[in-house]
Amino acid sequence: MNEFDYVIVGAGAAGCVLANRLSASGKHRVAVLEAGGPDRHIWIKVPAGFNKTVYNPKLNWGYETAPSPHIDNRRIVFPRGKVLGGSGSINGHLYVRGQAADYDTWAQLGCRGWSWTDVLPYFKRAERRIGGDDAVRGRDGPLYIEDQREPHPLSDAYIAANEALGLKRTPDYNCGDQEGTFLYQQMMRGGRRWSPADAYLRPALSRPNLRVIPWAQAERIVFEGKRATGVQYRGRDGKSQTMRAGRDVILCGGSINTPHLLQISGVGDPEWLKAFGGAVVHALPGVGRNFRDHYAARVSALVKGAGSLNERSHGVRLVGEVIRYAFTRKGLLAASPSHAGGYLRTRPGLETPDMQLYFAPASYAAGRYGTSALDTKPGMTLGASQLRPESVGHVKALSADPMEKPEIQPNYLADQIDRDALLAALKYLRKLLVTRPLADYVVCENLPGPDVKTDDELMAHARATGSTTYHPVGTCKLGIDPMAVVEPQSMKVIGLHGLRVADASVMPTMVSGNTYAATNMIAEKASDLILA
Ligand SMILES: Cc1cc2nc3c(=O)[nH]c(=O)nc-3n(C[C@H](O)[C@H](O)[C@H](O)COP(=O)(O)OP(=O)(O)OC[C@H]3O[C@@H](n4cnc5c(N)ncnc54)[C@H](O)[C@@H]3O)c2cc1C
């Protein structure tokens, strides 16, 4: 059978939710096309496996950005999951909803039905969480949210140093008001990654009305006039075939691939489409625009007497850690790339925090936080990224060939507000290094190091060593303005029939924090809107 009611493109954070919710009643036939393969890789399940999966070409689309002018024209490696669970199978496990004000802003921009009060029930429906306030936290959803099983003493010292600088400890940064310092909550169950495939897809796989097809890359949306009637995809055998959609094609390919697929299918800015020789099915200039991402910069220090993760990552101690994890699901292998953090305001007069902080009781070779081999010397890393960057980039197809990668131009630090905020944050991080009790462990600042003194030097460091925190959003935004792509009350692509989008690309503005939880919420709400 090659006809279904709903054809979902992408089994990532959003696609897994929709596959489950749309097939739950048994009334609708649902197909999911996923370009990647099954999620059996051992390092997907083990939290510390982040370092092993984040660049693994078998699990990844292998993107790199275009040279970004305001960060010394550097290209940034840009991982996106290509596997069941999508980026949710290779991400850093941190569970962060953002601020109530983020969603109230969406509503004010014209996205009626997306205020904090409107979306809170969907956050709650998704979650299975012990702790926090019943009024805001979910208890029996499919997504397990755990506290850290064994907080590291350096993380405790980091939190205490934040408190000494006036940032109070917050009992739950996911209650709408984030401000404070804390240990990150994680998407884990019993010390193992709990991905969208675990939470939503696997429990639904036995349903006769749901078919999930791995190794199936959507090449083009098939249109009859202004109606999407199906998807042309390339299967594992390399042959192209068409899957028909009786009701809707639902795009869940993420913030890079969803606008790319629309563009190569003839939906986008006509000038951009013509530039690569594409036909114009429907002019929609916002497709691929409004790209936003979090750009992080770091400082690191060599430490003593702290049992940093560097010391536990080789030789006999590593063997001990492996055995410990096998029996207790604790220790080095149960660790996410970030352990503790904070939300703070970098200048007076701001309504809510504008900066997110990250902390790891480890340092990394080449200073690339969380994404490469651990350094041999004991260390710790403190990072920061501005929560709602003003700098805007784009995703643009350069060829009609679906196998050709699109241009990703992030435009990091293009806006002065973003530069000012990051500079203030880096100064704050350096202040933490000399604040007790964290200072008691510090041997010396390692990165950027004592030679970097002036603001200009600190910004040069931010430009030269900063990187993505993997949170692209906004490239098919919900809204009612001329650059809007998706209709907020139905998730339909504006001006077309039988075509909807529900993934991170629909966020009209950046949420204040890591983007998984908001994407999960969007898909939960989208499932109700679609079924209605
Ligand atoms: C390395 C990394 C670390 C991160 N860490 C965190 C974190 O700690 N906390 C957090 O909240 N967020 C984190 N994120 C972000 C978070 O994972 C994403 O915001 C979220 O997964 C986005 O969901 P999505 O459904 O939009 O896209 P994805 O989860 O990326 O899913 C898209 C899916 O669609 C498939 N697909 C794409 N194009 C096609 C096509 N043409 N045909 C068929 N299938 C297709 C992809 O293979 C993929 O499976 C991280 C992301 C990455 C990459």
Image: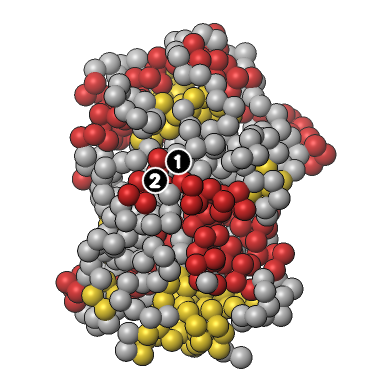
Q: Secondary structure at mark 2?
A: helix
Q: Which mark is on residue 104?
A: 2
User: Which residue is found at the position 20% from the left and 35% from the top?
Assistant: 416
**Disc 1 crowd, CA 10 A, few/some/many (<14, 14-19, 20+):** many
Classify 306 as above or below 344.
Answer: above
Q: In screen coordinates, is 393 left or right of 129?
A: left
**Amino acid found under the numbered disc labelled 2:** Asp
Decide if residue 110 is on the left or right side of residue 20: left
Which of 529/78 is in front? 529
Viewer-side residue, 108 vs 49: 108
Question: Which residue is at the front of the view, 336 or 203?
Answer: 203
Q: CA distance from mark 2 to mark 1?
A: 6 Å
The location of residue 51, given as percent across then percent down, is 56, 44
Q: Is residue 222 visible?
A: yes
| x, y percent for residue 102 | 40, 43
Residue ID for mark 1: 100
- Mark 1 residue element: helix
Where is residue 220 drawn, in percent x and y? 39, 80
Q: Is residue 220 left or right of residue 360?
A: left
Q: How is the image coloured?
A: secondary structure
Residue type at mark 1? Ala
For the N terminus, the quadrant is: bottom right
Q: Do the CB atoms of the residues marked 2 and 1 lie less than 8 Å apart? A: yes
